[in-house]
Amino acid sequence: MNAPATLSAVNPAKLLREQIRAGRHTTVTTGMAPRHLQANLVILPADWAEEFASFCAANPKPCPLIARSEPGDPALPSLGYDIDVRSDLPRYRVFRDGAVVSEETDITALWRDDLIAFALGCSYSFEAALLDAGVPIRHIEQGKKVCTYRTALDTEPAGRLHGRMVVSMRNFTVPNAIRAIEITSRFPRVHGAPIHFGDPAAIGIADIDKPEFGGEPDIRPGEVPLFWACGVTPQAVIEAAKPPFCITHKAGHMLVTDRLNEEFREA
Amino acid sequence: MNAPATLSAVNPAKLLREQIRAGRHTTVTTGMAPRHLQANLVILPADWAEEFASFCAANPKPCPLIARSEPGDPALPSLGYDIDVRSDLPRYRVFRDGAVVSEETDITALWRDDLIAFALGCSYSFEAALLDAGVPIRHIEQGKKVCTYRTALDTEPAGRLHGRMVVSMRNFTVPNAIRAIEITSRFPRVHGAPIHFGDPAAIGIADIDKPEFGGEPDIRPGEVPLFWACGVTPQAVIEAAKPPFCITHKAGHMLVTDRLNEEFREA
């Protein structure tokens, strides 16, 4: 039994991962352990791994690579010494030949010696910085999910990997939009500054009221939508490139790491 | 007579100031000594100086104070060891009771023991950074003056000083607008990020095609106007607050300093 003095030093990210690993938390990680970096996950067989690493290097805004595992090793020690990517996310999507075949809360039974895990930065980190700076985020105020959209913007292909960019949207007054660009530009390893603002049609979004994920947005007069490259983009790429096997996180069900968001702020 | 070895080390800002001081350059300093910080100038009697310093502190975007002189001393040694603010700008505006009474190319005859000079950062510094980053600026490409506008935005008053903000406008494609916000946010001492983008009417500009200074802008489909707080704002404040005596630079006819723009980039 732990003494109170020990409890006070407990890492909230590690505690949350333990809950997730034990199957006691299977929903989104939004707003949990808020000072800790959360990450998108992509697991691919080794014969696709170098192409995926190249894809990330060519597309740093949607795919800011922050860690990769050794082949067959489910650990990501640079993000947390005890991380096991097979059990530490609340929900996974399993792809075969580019199609989702199941959702899982644990992928230990699917693990193979040739799998490599990639962790990518996530916008939750810059959302924390926006809130800290007093820039309100409507969907968080309303307890909703962030809206994401498929766009007509092609990613930079790498080998067999190609596809279109997925974006997340947050709407602001113009002064707060400027602040949001300023602040997120300081976080290049968690998507950085937006890739677009204003007219959704300019990036191939036909109807801003119909996001791919998330509910109908609440954009008020005088507000402008800002669009950030999203870590769900690799899932659109997997659908387009159809590798025989792939596992990702499910949107919003992230890897919660021991690293702090502030470590990812540029000077 | 200088030897060539000496000439090669000559400071282009100092050379330009010498030309101006000798009356051989009396037009705008736009694009000259482009790596050097240029500054807006405001000269006020000592009994208005503390209010003006407070006004700058309260309005750092239009009035980023970078140096002030001692009373009666026309030097600004932190900006250049030989600067004489009475002769080193190509053109001045003299205000009495808030109205322009003359334009001068030298104000030595008007100098008084109670005058204090203030130098404020200027957008030429961030324009150089934008061009260095490959972000094109239409009015520079076309060899025109930047467009400036009076707005309905009140400045923060300080003592007897009050008035509305003047802005400068540059138009960009949306991706370049995002880059421009990112880059200029790193230069808080030369106006920093824009204060507005998009709808001119939102800040009280009735007709964007009719700037206060500069010609008709060339804003193309898909481009967005960005508005930066402008160092001409103090001249609007002088008009509103009507101090008995004031001298400023004339728009575009700046103090060219020995300091480098890069010294004013934040880490």
Image (spheres, coloured by chain):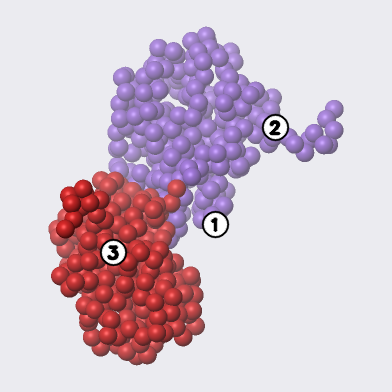
Chain colours: A red, B purple
Q: Disc 3 vs disc 1: which is toward the camera?
A: 3
Q: What residue did someone put label 2 on?
A: B15
Q: Earlier in the sequence, mark 1 or mark 2?
A: 2
Depth order, front residue of A66/B3: A66
Q: What residue did someone put label 1 on?
A: B134
**Which of the chains bears the disc numbered 2?**
B
* Residue appearing at x 31%, y 19% in the figure: B159
Badge 1 vs badge 2, beta-carbon distance below 8 Å? no
Q: What residue did someone put label 3 on?
A: A256
Amino acid at pointer 1 = Gly
Q: Position of residue B60 (x, y in %)?
A: 39, 33
Marks 1 and 2, how far apart in space?
Answer: 28 Å
- Quarter holding residue A206: bottom left
Are labels 3 and 1 assigned to the same chain? no
Q: Which mark is residue A62?
A: none
Q: Is residue B19 left or right of residue B119?
A: right
**Which of the chains bears the disc numbered 3?**
A
- Crowdedness of circle 1 by 10 Å Cα count: few (<14), some, many (20+)? few
Depth order, front residue of A128/A137: A128
Marks 3 and 1, how far apart in space?
Answer: 38 Å
- Crowdedness of circle 3 by 10 Å Cα count: few (<14), some, many (20+)? many
Are labels 2 and 3 assigned to the same chain? no
**Which of the chains bears the disc numbered 1?**
B
